[in-house]
Structure formats: C-alpha cells, structure tokens
Amino acid sequence: MATVERLVKNGTRPEIPKKNGDLFTRLAGWTIRATGGRWGFLTAFGTVIVWALMGPFCHYSENWQLVINTGTTIVTFLMVFLIQNAQNRESKAIHLKLDELILAVTHARNELIDIEHLTEEQLDMIARRYKKVAEQNHYKLEPCFAVKEAAPKA
C-alpha cells in the first residue's frame, strides 16, 4: 500500500502546473462567480423590471414579449453549459481530493481510488457492502443517543 510520504520520498509526486487554464475556463469561472452572486441576481431582476415597465410604452406588443422570451432563452441556454462546465471541474477536483485522502490514510483501501468509473452494478455491490458494515456497527452509536436520567436530589 503506497503512502503519500513514500511517493514523495521516491520522487514520484507529480508536478501540478500553476497555469490558470484556457480562456474558456477562465471566462466560465468568472461568469459563474458573477452570475451566481447577488449582483447577478440584481442585474437579472433589474432587467425584468425595466422590461415590465416598458410594457405600456410598447403597448404590450408581441415584439415586447419576444424580447424577454428570446433573451431568457439565450441566457438559459448558455448558462446550462457554463454551469455544467463548473460542476464537472468541481466534481473532478472533489474526486481527486478524496483519492488523495484514501491514498494518505494507511488503513484505507487503495482499490477505492477512481471508482467513479465503475459500472452502476459494481458501485451497487460496493454500496451494499458498506451498508452491511454500517448496520453491524450502528449499535456503537446507541450510547450517544441515550437520554441520561437526572440524578435524584439529596
């Protein structure tokens, strides 16, 4: 079983590049941060308010309705890809962090590293195994939930 210390001592620790990523990754990250905060919400809310206030001036025409429908459709379409990109990167980072923890803990089973690529049936088999282990050890939690009776006052 390899440990992180052994990998470092052997000089097999991979170098992590300090690059910020390509233009799309940087732009996607910035857009997700900008639109996911209060300013993104306030901008969207303000846009809807301005559009609604323009209704009477445009006589609630079909073009007036088309503007908001087209705008929201385009923004939603593009945001789906940006959000998916961000989730994919975050998911990959979390898996790599978990893999590092598995590798670092001496009693952990290194076979569990990178199991997200197994089939659904294989993952279900592993889940059943851990469910059995949990059921066998739940009794250890019972003292944590026991209500302690107050001692009688003398």
Image: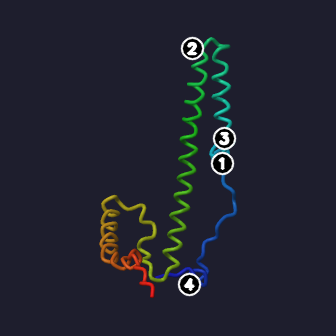
**Which numbered disc, 2 or 4, marks the residue that appears first in the sequence?**
4
Give yes or no for contact between labels 3 and 4 (Cβ–Cβ under 8 Å): no
The amino acid sitting under disc 1 is Arg
Q: CA distance from mark 1 to mark 2?
A: 34 Å
97 above or below 81?
Answer: below
**Which numbered disc, 1 or 2, marks the residue that appears first in the sequence?**
1
Tell whether 131 sits left or right of 87: left
**Which numbered disc, 4 or 1, marks the residue that appears first in the sequence?**
4
Check disc 1: other Cα within 10 Å, few if <14, some if 14-19, many if 20+: few
Check disc 2: other Cα within 10 Å, few if <14, some if 14-19, many if 20+: few
Q: Which residue is mark 1?
A: 33
Q: CA distance from mark 3 to mark 2?
A: 27 Å
Q: Secondary structure at mark 2?
A: helix
Which residue is more in the foreground, 8 or 154? Answer: 154
Q: CA distance from mark 2 to mark 4?
A: 69 Å
The amino acid sitting under disc 2 is Glu
**Which numbered disc, 3 or 2, marks the residue that appears first in the sequence?**
3
Check disc 4: other Cα within 10 Å, few if <14, some if 14-19, many if 20+: few
Q: Nearer the viewer, mark 2 or mark 4?
A: 2
Q: Which residue is mark 3?
A: 40
Which residue is more in the foreground, 35 or 22? Answer: 35
**Which numbered disc, 3 or 1, marks the residue that appears first in the sequence?**
1
Q: Which residue is mark 4?
A: 6
Which residue is more in the foreground, 91 or 142? Answer: 142
| Residue 31 picture quarter | top right
Q: Secondary structure at mark 1?
A: helix
Q: Which residue is mark 2?
A: 62
